[in-house]
């Protein structure tokens, strides 16, 4: 009799826990498979589509320059800007000569001005401290921001 009571209570607890987890996932998303959000008009995460590089840099410095956050600029090795940016390429990037892309990465707290990689590179990645994927990818066309791509995963919460 006591075994049945324990099993019954365990079953009820399991059903309640499963229901709570289902409601949490419906409300907040599956905690380990968050996904990506792309913005091509309007504003998101403090950035506005159509903003200048200088305006975007100001947002990056004021809102995202926290310990553990980095900025990375990516460019194709065959692009016209590669010759200008090769001097800024990180050592880790230089060792992978067969890769299609090169990059420059710095802690955001160390970047105090719009340096050449930020002036010339069309993609800035704001890599935020997190368990796995936690980044905002900013894409420019010329001097204007054209895309904001947010990627989160593995237990990252707002």
Image (tube, rainbow, N blue to C red):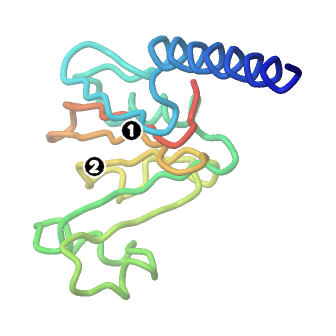
Residue in the image at 15% along x and 41% along y: 142
**In the displayed structure image, the side of residue 40 where residue 118 appears, left or right:** right
Residue in the image at 57% along x and 37% along y: 155
**In the displayed structure image, the side of residue 142 where residue 10 appears, left or right:** right
The N terminus: image quadrant: top right
Place of residue 53 in the rendered image (x, y in percent of width and height, measured from the top left)? 32, 36
The residue identified by callout 1 is 151
Place of residue 26 in the rendered image (x, y in percent of width and height, measured from the top left)? 44, 14
- Looking at the image, which is closer to me, 103 or 136? 136
Residue in the image at 77% along x and 17% along y: 9
Q: Is 113 located above or below residue 145 in the figure?
A: below
Q: Is 126 located above or below residue 96 in the figure?
A: above
Location of residue 94 by image quarter: bottom left
**In the displayed structure image, the side of residue 67 where residue 34 appears, left or right:** left
Q: Secondary structure at mark 1?
A: strand
- The local crowd at label 1, few if under 14, some if 14 to 19, many if 20 or more residues have their Cα within 10 Å, is some
Location of residue 24 by image quarter: top right
Place of residue 117 in the rendered image (x, y in percent of width and height, measured from the top left)? 35, 59
Tell which tag, 2 or 1, sits nearer the viewer. 1
Q: Is 3 located above or below residue 72 in the figure?
A: above
- Looking at the image, which is closer to me, 38 or 72? 38
User: What distance separates the C-alpha of mark 2 from that of mark 1?
Assistant: 15 Å
Place of residue 72 in the rendered image (x, y in percent of width and height, measured from the top left)? 42, 56
The residue identified by callout 2 is 123
Mark 2 in CB contact with mark 1 (< 8 angstroms): no
- The local crowd at label 2, few if under 14, some if 14 to 19, many if 20 or more residues have their Cα within 10 Å, is many
The C terminus: image quadrant: top right
Q: Earlier in the sequence, mark 2 or mark 1?
A: 2
């Amino acid at each position: 009799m006591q075994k049945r009571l324990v099993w019954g209570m365990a079953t009820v607890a399991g059903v309640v826990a499963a229901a709570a987890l289902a409601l949490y996932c419906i409300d907040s998303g599956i905690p380990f498979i968050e996904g990506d959000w792309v913005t091509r008009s309007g504003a998101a995460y403090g950035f506005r589509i159509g903003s200048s590089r200088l305006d975007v840099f100001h947002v990056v410095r004021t809102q995202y320059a926290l310990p553990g956050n980095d900025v990375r600029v990516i460019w194709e090795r065959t692009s016209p800007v590669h010759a200008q940016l090769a001097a800024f390429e990180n050592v880790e990037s230089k060792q992978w000569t067969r890769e299609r892309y090169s990059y420059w990465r710095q802690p955001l707290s160390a970047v105090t001005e719009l340096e050449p990689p930020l002036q010339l590179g069309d993609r800035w990645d704001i890599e935020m401290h997190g368990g796995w994927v936690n980044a905002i990818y900013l894409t420019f066309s010329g001097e204007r921001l054209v895309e904001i791509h947010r990627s989160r995963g593995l237990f990252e919460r707002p």
